[in-house]
Amino acid sequence: MSVLWKLGGKAARAGPGALCALSDRMSSLRPGCPAAMPPSTWPERTSSTLSEAYYQPSLTAEYDEDSPGGDFDFFSNLVTKWEAAARLPGDSTRQVVVRSGVVLGRGGGAISLMLLPFRLGLGGPIGSGHQFFPWIHIRDLVGILTHALEANHVQGVLNGVAPASTTTNAAFAQALGAALGRPAFLPLPSIAVQAVYGRERAIMLLEGQKVIPRRTLAAGYQYSFPELGAALKEVVA
């Protein structure tokens, strides 16, 4: 095997199921998995993981690939352990970690939970709507992974988010409403978000993060959907 992509595990939520979620995400990286094999079995190729929730939610901070994180709550610690478990031994393997934002695509993911209320004209921002909303079209996420695989100079952490880093949750709601031809002015109250998602996940949704794909752009990746409007029109078409 020349390439390992560790793409996912069970959806994680802090609370009673946290240990199960951690166990699921670690299980494919235990002894017996290619990532745990001796260095001699790995050619000079790439290992990629996808890691969300690494950066601390903030209404003001700006994060690029060199920013600290990964140690402030359950989700960030999970990401840190996941990335550490996926790290391949030795110096001969070129490793890339892609930290993705909210992935927009057809037939699943975050957008599938939003479409019904927005189609009914009942959608709107989460909480104040002022929080940043890092997103990426699924075609670009796949494109970044492919670019990391094919371009031998790419290594280290890449932020898998669109370059439109100033997108707020309110702007996202308006753009989704526009793509569907529906109003999008009904906010989802903070207390409802906390009741549905739990405290730590709610903080991520209510405060958000401004994430910059600085190294991704410097590595030469060309986005197919750099702007939110075009990305959402393709997803809901």
Image (cartoon, rainbow, N blue to C red):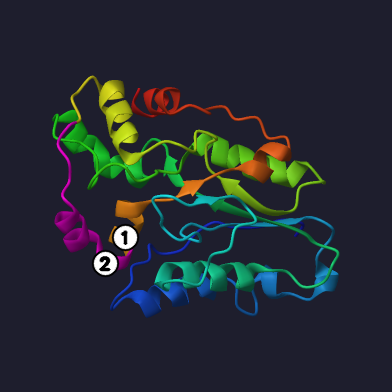
Judge by depth and name the residue closer to the eye, 141 or 10.
141
Going by the numbered disc 1, the residue's amino acid type is Ile
72 vs 237, left or right, is right
Q: Residue 25: x, y in percent?
A: 49, 70
Q: Which mark is residue 116?
A: none
Q: Splitting the image into 4 quarters, where does residue 175 fall?
A: top left
84 vs 192, left or right, is right
Count of numbered circles on the image: 2
Magenta portion: prevailing SS class: helix
Q: Write the residue at 14% across / 36% down.
A: 186
Looking at the figure, which quarter contains the C terminus? Answer: top left
Q: Residue 8: x, y in percent?
A: 49, 59
**Separation of disc 1 and disc 2 at Cα?**
6 Å
Task: Find disc 1 in the rendering and name its residue.
Answer: 203
Say if 48 sits above or below 222 in the image. below
161 vs 131, left or right, is right
Q: Write the residue at 21% across / 55% down.
A: 193
Rate crowding at label 2 as few (under 14), some (14 to 19) or many (20 or more) other CA atoms within 10 Å: some
Q: Which residues are magenta?
A: 185-200
Tell me, yes or no, whether the highlighted magenta stretch contains residue 187: yes
Q: Write the residue at 62% across / 37% down.
A: 143
Tell me, yes or no, whether the highlighted magenta stretch contains residue 223: no
Judge by depth and name the residue closer to the eye, 86 or 182.
182
Going by the numbered disc 2, the residue's amino acid type is Arg
Rate crowding at label 1 as few (under 14), some (14 to 19) or many (20 or more) other CA atoms within 10 Å: some
Q: Splitting the image into 4 quarters, where does residue 198 fall?
A: bottom left
Disc 1 is placed on an element classified as helix
Q: Write the residue at 80% across / 62% down.
A: 93
Task: Find disc 2 in the rendering and name its residue.
Answer: 199
Cβ–Cβ under 8 Å for marks 1 and 2: yes
Judge by depth and name the residue closer to the eye, 131 or 232.
131
68 vs 147, left or right, is left
